[in-house]
Structure formats: structure tokens, C-alpha cells
Image (cartoon, rainbow, N blue to C red):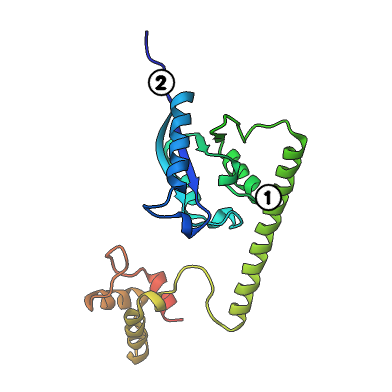
Amino acid sequence: MAKKEKTRAFAYLRTSSAANVGADKDSDKRQRGVIEGFARRAGFAIVAEFNDAAVSGTDPIETRPGFSALLDAVEANGTRTVIVEDASRFSRDLITQELGILTLISRSVRVVTCSGDDLTETTDPFKVAMRQIAGAFAQLEKARLVHKLKVARDRKRATGAKVEGRKSLEETHPAAVALARELARKRKQPLSLRAISAALAAAGHINERGRPFAAKSVASMLR
């Protein structure tokens, strides 16, 4: 009789204090042991472990390196189950906890605790309401951040500084721009854009593709 193939899963651990981290400490060892034991009994194969060491449960979920690496792995290899010791490994703060779970739900991931609870499926009206509130907070925070960044960009732009977009040729090829302007300025009979491009190439100034600058690029150098 063929042996049933185990379901691939990731393990997620978190220790909330630096005092609980290290070879001589047992918080991560205990979590790992509990998760591995549950996985064997429930038919899961742990394919990778992600650990946020010395990360407070109140720290925003998006700032946690272990959780970010977990999301990258989920998006990369198709594993859609995450096992945690219990819900508090995400956070003891309910809003932060639900935001973490919502982030995984949006990627079609199941979050299972070692007591067998599926945190991503619930008919508990309170949990449903909390997820709705957490989602609203997440949207509000995103909007606030977008607005904050826009204000910062506008403030910088008002000083005349370049804020965004592709770098100019004057930034990426300052020597070529200086020579192009010199060539255009010193000639009694103005050189064509193509002639300036050829002169630049002869002096070793070429574009990123290893070819002479296009006439349009030369024109932007002379502005």
C-alpha cells in the first residue's frame, strides 16, 4: 500500500526577549520540538523554519525579518501551510496577531497551531470582527504612510532637489555631458547631434549598451 505523501509546511518561531535567545536557552528549542512533534503526528513535513529571535510581540508584523523571509518563501515555492506553537507566536497583541494571520490568508496560506487549531478558519464572530478591524487598521496605516511619503517628497521637491524618476545623463555620464557642451559651444559652425555623438564615442563616451549616444540623448545633454 502506497505511503501517503506528507503535506509540506513551514515552521514559524518567535522569541520575545534577547534573554531567551542563544545556544544555552530553550525557548526556540521548545517551540521547535513541539512543532516537529505535531508535524509528525499530523502528517506534515517541515521544509523550512523561520525564526524571529528577540522580537517583541508588539513589534509590527511587517518589520520582522523572519516573517518577511517566510512570506518570500511562500511566494517562491508553493508551500501553503505554516505551523506555529500557538497564536501568541505571532503576537500577544490581538490586532498584530490578526494582521499577521490576515497577511497569510491573503496568500492562501493555512496557519495551524500545535494543538490542531486552524487560525485561518473560524466561525467565531469575535475573531471575524477582529480581522475586519485589523484589516481596517492596516488600510489606514498604509494610507497614512503613502501620505507621509508624499509630503516628504513634496517638501524635498520644493527645495529644487530631484526626488524620483530616472537619473539624468548629467548624473550618470557627467564627463560626456561636459564634453558635448564644450563641443557645441566652441564650434563656429554648430555640429549636428549625430556629429557630437560620434565625437563622444571617439573619446570613449558611449551609452549603457556600448553604443554611441542617440541624437535624442545628445540633445538632452545640451539643454
Per the image, label 1 sits on a secondary structure element best described as helix
Q: How far from the left and from the top, in percent, is residue 187?
A: 33, 90
Task: Work out how far the residue at label 2 is from the one at label 1, CA to CA, in angstroms.
Answer: 36 Å
Percent of width and height locating residue 8: 43, 30
> Is residue 204 in view?
yes
Q: Give the residue number, with chain letter if any, for mark 1.
A: 95
Tag 2 residue: 5
Q: Position of residue 174 (x, y in %)?
A: 36, 80
Residue found 54% across the figure and 58% down from its top: 63
Disc assigned to residue 161: none
Three-letter code for the amino acid on which mark 2 is drawn: Glu
Q: Residues within 10 Å of mark 2 (few under 14, many from 20)?
A: few
In terms of image quadrants, where is residue 77? top left
Horizontal arrangement in the rendering, residue 218 relative to residue 130 (left or right): left
Viewer-proximal residue among 37 and 84? 37
| Picture residue at 65% right of the left edge, 68% below the top | 148
The answer to whether residue 135 is left or right of residue 173 is right
Q: Is residue 7 above or below residue 161?
A: above
Looking at marks 2 and 1 on the same chain, the residue that comes earlier in the sequence is marked by: 2
What quarter of the picture does the N terminus occupy?
top left
In the displayed structure image, the side of residue 88 where residue 94 appears, left or right: right
